[in-house]
Image (tube, grey):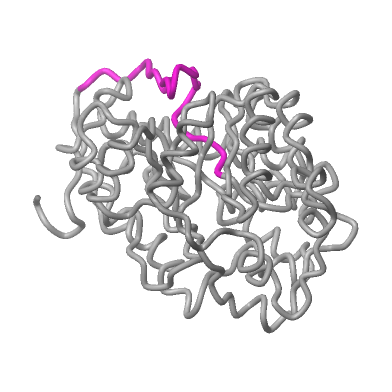
Amino acid sequence: MKDLINLFDFEAAALTRLPAGPRDYYRGGAGDEITLRANRSAWDRWSIHYRVLRDVAKRDLSTQVLGQKLDWPVMIAPTAYHQMAHPDGEIATARAAASTGTAMVLSTLSNKPMEEVARAATRGLWFQLYCYKDRGITQDLIARAAAAGCGAIVLTVDTPVGAVRERDVRNEFSFPANLPMSNLLPAGERYSMPDLGQGGFSGYVNQMFDPSLSWRDLDWIVATSKLPVLVKGIVRPDDARRALGRGAQGIIVSNHGGRQLDSAPATADVLDSVVRAAGQDALVMVDGGIRRGTDVLKALALGARAVLIGRPVLWGLAVGGEDGVRRVLDLLRNEFSVAMALAGCQALDEIERALLGRAGRDD
């Protein structure tokens, strides 16, 4: 892996190792993949107006999120089915996150059960929640996350129905029958080992997830959970204000990695306005297209407390298991540290909106 020197190298290497179905499931987006591409290009439209002569010999990358200390402001985003990339699956991902001083958000649709992952994630684990039509299943997942020692519930709200992901349609993709959705095992095989058939993953979403999910359900989840609840999938300022006003402890600006509504805005384009609407003290995080240390710096300058990365972790997992994920994280952390130095920042609180302008402009 020494010849892989950035996250794009890991992606290229992983794509040669994965079968077509898992490869395109991981990397693909919805529809024409407009939002998928925009997530990446939007970060490039921000320029960094760096400061000089600032004494950056020592830099502090650490932060706190919901009382959890992180050595640097990047967490692992929830992504499904890690065992398609490596047999150790989410256990390897959790160990790599812990060894690099950060925490992980575990998908509802993980192959490894939350209890096992929580034991490996010694630097912190949050649980990402889909709301099922069967509220008993949803309630059980919330209770198990608390019992397992998770630090938060991350409610995904941008998936009332499944989008059409044409790569999966062309590949007739279905999850491997020998890899269950382990968190759903108590609910039975219909939920944990479904025959996805012609409908594919979107068919599972449309059968199982609740399209009537509303603000009333957020009220119920906040009241039900012993853990702080964050809302993931926000791209509008008014939705951010409403989520926080109804008891959410934070929001994650996200468009599901371009995998749901195609032509949704890139997260880098809406983060600034969402942060302003949420207020100075609100916990706002962001994902989508982050591949460079400079992207992390830009996200923090726009007001995010921390960022999350998803696909690069899967590429690291496919290339080298736990060591591959650790290498991906180490590369990004080093890039971020260098970006801080070159921008004239000793600590995260010096990464301010005044550092940013639109590329090619002076604002």
Nearer to us in this view, 219 or 309: 219
- Residue 146: quarter of image: top right
Tell me which residue sits at (68%, 84%) in the image.
170
Magenta highlight on residue 223: no
| Above or below, comparing residue 323 to residue 84 in the picture | above
| Above or below, comparing residue 206 to residue 357 in the picture | below
Q: Residue furthest left?
A: 362
Tell me which residue sits at (47%, 80%) in the image.
32
Tell me which residue sits at (35%, 17%) in the image.
57
Tell me which residue sits at (50%, 33%) in the image.
333
Left or right side of 60 for 349 = left
- Residue 154 percent coordinates (x, y): 51, 39
The range drawn in magenta is 54-77
Magenta highlight on residue 74: yes
| Above or below, comparing residue 165 to residue 229 in the picture | below
- Residue 343 percent coordinates (x, y): 27, 34
Nearer to us in this view, 55 or 209: 209
Nearer to us in this view, 312 or 184: 184
Q: Residue furthest right?
A: 178
Please identify the dominant SS of the magenta region.
loop
**Count of residue discs:** 0
